Image (tube, rainbow, N blue to C red):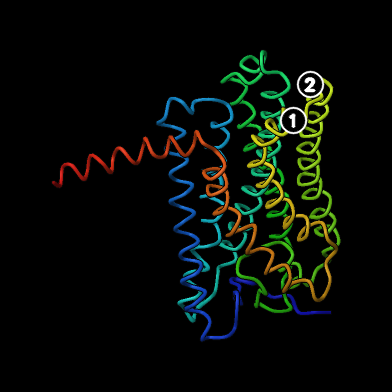
Amino acid sequence: MENVTTVNEFLLLGLTSVQQLQPFFFVIFLIIYLINLVGNGAILVITILEPKLHSAMYFFLGNLSCLDICYSSVTLPKVLINLLSAHRTISFLGCITQLYFFHFLGSTEAVLLAVMAFDRFAAICNPLRYPVIMSPKVCILLAAVAWITSIFNALVHSVMTARLNFCRSQELNHFFCDVKPLLELACSNTLLNQWLLFVVTGSVSMGTFFLTLLSYLYIICSLLLKHKSCRILHKALSTCACHFTVVCLFYGPVGFTYIRPASATSMTQDRMVAIVYSAVTPVLNPLIYTLRNKEVRLALKETFGSKLFKDCRQHH
């Protein structure tokens, strides 16, 4: 029987063990994090300040931007610190806390993307009833459901992981605390944890993904039956293109990591894929929405362009 010792901290092995590459990774991830803060922060500001964007679609977009800032802030600051430090430890409590918020925010994003798909369905398929269907009260309720229901998923994983006994090693083969790498270090039975990861996280991610696809399917069928015009169908779907791109960027890596069965060689792949959904996707969200959305681009110019113009005039 293996000796069970109380683990007070874990050693995060990080992105690479090659010392010479760490400054390079630090610069890359610092740039990614700053773009994330500035891009999503700008979208959050304009959805609050710009009256033209006070609609359901942009209310959820503001929620998504806030979520992306928090989501990457759970992992990236610690990654940046570890890339500059020889002491890469994280306390047991800090590890479980990071795990909790990572799954809480990840689940919230999954539900929120499904809500945003329903919003597009209501806007395109029921334009006359849209103001009633997506009233301010309904929007707040749906956003609250997305945030509150995710507490359960995060609590399940954090509590069940915290109850495990760790005796194999304190070296965590990842750049942040997640369920799969922690299960690799556990010496107690992890069958229930693996089952919960597959069933609970799988249900949340795949359930919301299928609801999202269902919304798009209804949009396509409704437009084809009503108009029978490819031009109208293309115009309507172009408004959903931004959202659909974000959906693919989010659900693809998440499905690869959590629904795929664990294997001895999967941890390195999981670490690489985790970079996509924890760092890259939150940065791409504001870029995708601003490049594809005229209203957001105009609002950004009016809000920040006018301020820059005023500042320039004051200096001159």
- On the image, which quarter does residue 225 sit in? top right
Eyeballing the image, is 171 above or below 55?
Answer: below
Task: Assign the N terminus to one quadrant of the image.
Answer: bottom right
Label 1 Cα crowd, 10 Å radius (few <14 / some 14-19 / many 20+): some
Mark 1 element type: helix
Residue closest to the eye, 129 or 205: 129
Q: Which residue is mark 1?
A: 233
**Residue 305: image x %, image y %?**
33, 41
Viewer-nearest residue: 13 or 11:
13
Give me the disc on residue 5: none
Apparent side of residue 58 relative to residue 84 in the rendered image (left or right): right
Type of the residue with mark 2: His
Depth check, front residue: 174 or 269: 269
**Kind of residue indicated by mark 1:** Leu
Relative side of 121 to 206, left or right: left
x and y, in percent, of residue 14 in the image:
59, 74
Q: Give how far across and how far down residue 77 sits, in percent.
A: 48, 63
Give the residue displayed 66% in from the left and 63% down from the top: 274
Which residue does the numbered mark 2 point to in the structure image? Answer: 227
